[in-house]
Amino acid sequence: MSGISFKIDEGDTFDVINPEGEQIADLVAFTQADDDEKFSQSYTRYLSSLRVSAGDSLYTTEGNPILTILKDDCGVHDLLYAPCNEWLLDQDRYAGDAPGGCRENLWLSLKPKGFDEADIPDTLNIFQKSTVSEQKFMNVHRSPAEPGDTVTFEADQDAIIAVSSCSAASESNGDELTGIDVVVPDDSTVHEASVLD
């Protein structure tokens, strides 16, 4: 139930790690040159794949690659769902009464860099298993991530990254909400924030 943000230079890598398994993480990315250019779910689906994994790139609103997945232990991620937020977590399908979700945590971690909440795009939902049934309904299932599963990303250009540990208390995150580890380049400044603070 928190998020971090950091800058990364072209060619550098970072890892998103699921230390206990079954925990979803949400990721957004912005170009350092123009923070109006950011990760796009829809253009990534169009230019890469609906099911991204090792070797696939994430694309921006301008159709440029921003991150490439170098290594992927889990191989299951979602490009359909928006990040959870305060009003979504109030729905009956979620337990608990969190004051906000991934959208708020991503924004709070990016706020020191001048971002507004409206700047947060739909996310890459790392370790999230979702399916479409009857060509009509989207469904989220328990994350298949095993303890220690890691996804390694390489920056295709200078970027600003934010990652949150999902706040939706539901079967999709296993039996309980746990943490996500992010390993960033040594010279990175990390901003951490949580709606719980």
Image (spheres, rainbow, N blue to C red):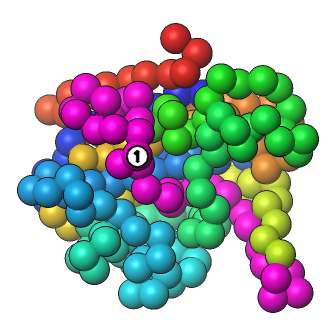
Left or right side of 89 for 29 = left
Expressed as whole percent of the image width and height from the top left, the position of residue 37 reads 24, 63
What residue did someone put label 1 on?
Answer: 118
Q: Identify whether 125 is placed above or below 135.
A: above
Residue 74 shows up from this direction: no
Asked whether 85 or 106 is in front, the reply is 85
Span colored in magenta = 107-136
- For the point 41% across and 39% down, the residue is 117
Name which residue type carries label 1.
Ala
Residue 71 shows up from this direction: yes
Left or right side of 135 for 84 = left
- For the point 40% across and 46% down, the residue is 118
- Looking at this rendering, what residue extends furthest in the top direction? 197
Q: Identify whether 187 is placed above or below 27.
A: above
Q: Identify whether 45 is placed above or below 76.
A: below
Expressed as whole percent of the image width and height from the top left, the position of residue 152 reads 40, 56
Quarter of the figure with residue 67: bottom left
Quarter of the figure with residue 190: top left
Expressed as whole percent of the image width and height from the top left, the position of residue 86 reads 65, 34
Question: Is disc 1 surrounded by few (<14), some (14 to 19) or many (20+) residues within 10 Å?
Answer: few
> The N terminus is located in which quarter?
top right
Left or right side of 139 for 4 = left
- For the point 62% across and 40% down, the residue is 85
Expressed as whole percent of the image width and height from the top left, the position of residue 122 reads 50, 58
Please tell me whether residue 56 belongs to the stretch shown in magenta. no
Left or right side of 41 for 170 = right
